[in-house]
Image (cartoon, rainbow, N blue to C red):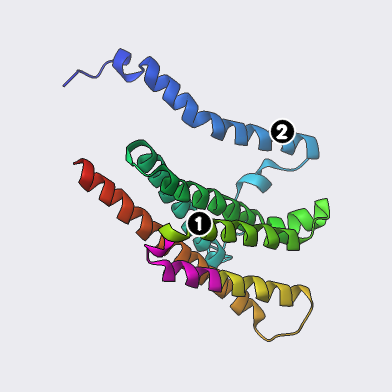
Amino acid sequence: MNNLTFGNLFKKDSLVLIMKILMPGILVVSLLVACSAIFKIEFGVFSQDVLPMPYIGILSNIGVIFWSVTIGILLFSYTFLERNGKDKSENKFFFFAGLLTIFLLIDDFFEMHDNIFPRFLFISENWFYAIYAFSVLAILYFYRKFILGTDYILLLLSLVFLGSSIFSDIISALNINVPHLLIFEDGFKFLGITLWFAYFSRTSYKFVKQEVSLKY
């Protein structure tokens, strides 16, 4: 085992790796500092928790965690299978599913279709629903044979719950008075996210494990 020295602790490759990891974070912080200075907004508005009560938005926050973990699993699976797998076309399934999940996470976390785009860019949230529907249908169509070999019932249930959440959101946008509608809207979305996570984590595990057993 090599002795720990200043030279091998800060090797060139290690420094390059550290910079690659830190640069995106530094860029985000710098951007928020610039926004703080330009728009005269306290930096704490961007950096601190929304409220000192941890239960505020807890269901949404847990949902974001599930989105994030699913993205990590899908992109890891794609990278691993792309480097070690044989069927390149099926590997792309994990990539496109991860890409779609990234957009779903960004939309959910920053409320893009609810607030940002309609309020500042005057783009209707219906465009988001159309894009998501097209993306899901494209994945289902092009990878239908692959999906049929998996526990697709989890994916179908996820889409049913997420679709029900969107339907509840549309009812709310039409100002139709339905008691406790928010329970259905956010509850269905959360259940859809958990099933989305369950399907893709289970599918990823199956094919990564299969490839590992073949290699080793």
213 with respect to 206 (left or right)? left
Residue appearing at x 48%, y 46% in the figure: 95
Question: With respect to residue 14, does 124 lie above or below?
Answer: below
Q: Residue 92, percent across and down?
A: 46, 46
Residue appearing at x 74%, y 63% in the figure: 126
Which of 111/2 is in front? 111
The N terminus lies in which quarter of the figure?
Answer: top left
Q: Which residue is mark 1?
A: 67
Residue appearing at x 31%, y 15% in the figure: 6
Q: Which mark is residue 34?
A: 2
Q: Secondary structure at mark 2?
A: helix
Q: Amino acid at mark 2?
A: Ala
Q: Residue 2, percent across and down?
A: 19, 18
Which of 28/142 is in front? 142
Range covered by the magenta-colored residues: 147-160
Which of 210/67 is in front? 210
Indicate yes or no whether the magenta region holds residue 32: no
The C terminus lies in which quarter of the figure?
Answer: top left
